[in-house]
């Protein structure tokens, strides 16, 4: 049986908590860098290929400040921000034992961290705009790999009038929502008939339980599906 592919975008808002999250995932599912072998007693633990897509975080914020100060062109800002994602990937790998990869082909079992610059520079699949940030990039990766798409952030999900919404459609999102997702993501999900599950990454067990199909506090954002 082929592993289930899961793309987990880890936001920059989790920079302090992200190493614990990555290491908890490795403890549960292993990592390609460790040559994970099948677990006969718990075969479900080796049935996942998990690709972590890093956010931009403080590294992309530095590019935003440079843009505000010096007026960068769209192309320069786009690639510099993706290099910010690349820096976050190095940070995550430094704080964990996860394998690193710059490819989305033939993902190994267990946890891998995507170094996205080379892939995106070669494919260049998305508009060069501050509206298209790491959320939409991660969604594109999930589409290319046929993955379950999880956005790990620092809140429980999307709220309306102070209450957590368990499920919403992209067509329902508006200015009235306290949204933690990037501006271009709803349109991308809508166009590609995809779903994004928004989960609080400060609680690694929630991510793991959601991967096993169990209910957790979160918001499922559905795009025309």
Image (cartoon, rainbow, N blue to C red):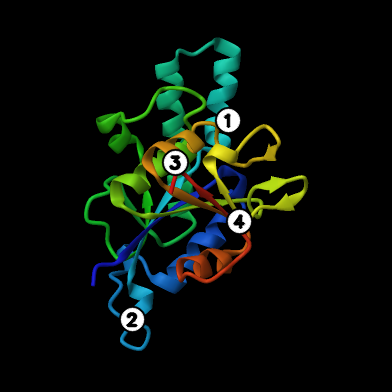
Residue 100 at x, y percent in the picture: 34, 52
The disc at residue 17 is 4
Nearest to the observer: residue 206 or residue 78: 206
Residue located 32% across and 34% down the image: 120
Q: Secondary structure at mark 1?
A: helix
CA gap between label 3 and label 4 equals 27 Å
CA gap between label 3 and label 2 equals 32 Å
The residue indicated by pointer 1 is: 61
Local packing at callout 1 (Cα closer than 10 Å; few below 14, some 14-19, many 20+) is: some
Local packing at callout 3 (Cα closer than 10 Å; few below 14, some 14-19, many 20+) is: many
Q: Earlier in the sequence, mark 3 or mark 2?
A: 2
Residue 110 at x, y percent in the picture: 35, 66
The disc at residue 43 is 2
CA gap between label 1 and label 2 equals 41 Å
Q: Is residue 193 left or right of residue 162?
A: left
User: In the figure, 48 relative to 177: above or below?
Assistant: below
């Amino acid at each position: 049986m082929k592993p289930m592919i899961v793309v987990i975008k880890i936001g920059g808002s989790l920079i302090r908590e992200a190493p614990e999250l990555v290491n908890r995932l490795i403890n549960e599912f292993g990592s390609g860098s460790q040559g994970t072998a099948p677990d006969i007693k718990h075969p479900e633990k080796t049935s996942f290929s998990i690709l972590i897509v890093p956010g931009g975080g403080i590294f992309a914020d530095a590019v935003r400040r440079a843009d505000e100060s010096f007026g960068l062109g769209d192309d320069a800002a786009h690639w510099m921000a993706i290099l910010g994602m690349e820096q976050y990937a190095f940070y995550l790998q430094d704080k964990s034992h996860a394998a690193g990869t710059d490819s989305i082909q033939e993902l190994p079992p267990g946890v891998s961290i995507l170094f996205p610059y080379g892939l995106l520079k070669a494919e260049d699949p998305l508009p060069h705009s501050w509206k298209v940030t790491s959320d939409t990039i991660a969604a594109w990766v999930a589409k290319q790999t046929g993955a379950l798409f999880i956005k790990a952030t620092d809140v429980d999900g999307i709220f309306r009038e102070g209450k957590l919404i368990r499920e919403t459609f992209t067509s329902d999102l508006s200015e009235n929502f306290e949204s933690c997702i990037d501006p271009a993501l709803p349109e991308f999900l809508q166009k590609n008939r995809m779903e994004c599950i928004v989960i609080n990454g400060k609680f690694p067990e929630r991510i793991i339980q959601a991967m096993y199909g169990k209910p957790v506090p979160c918001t499922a954002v559905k795009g025309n599906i």
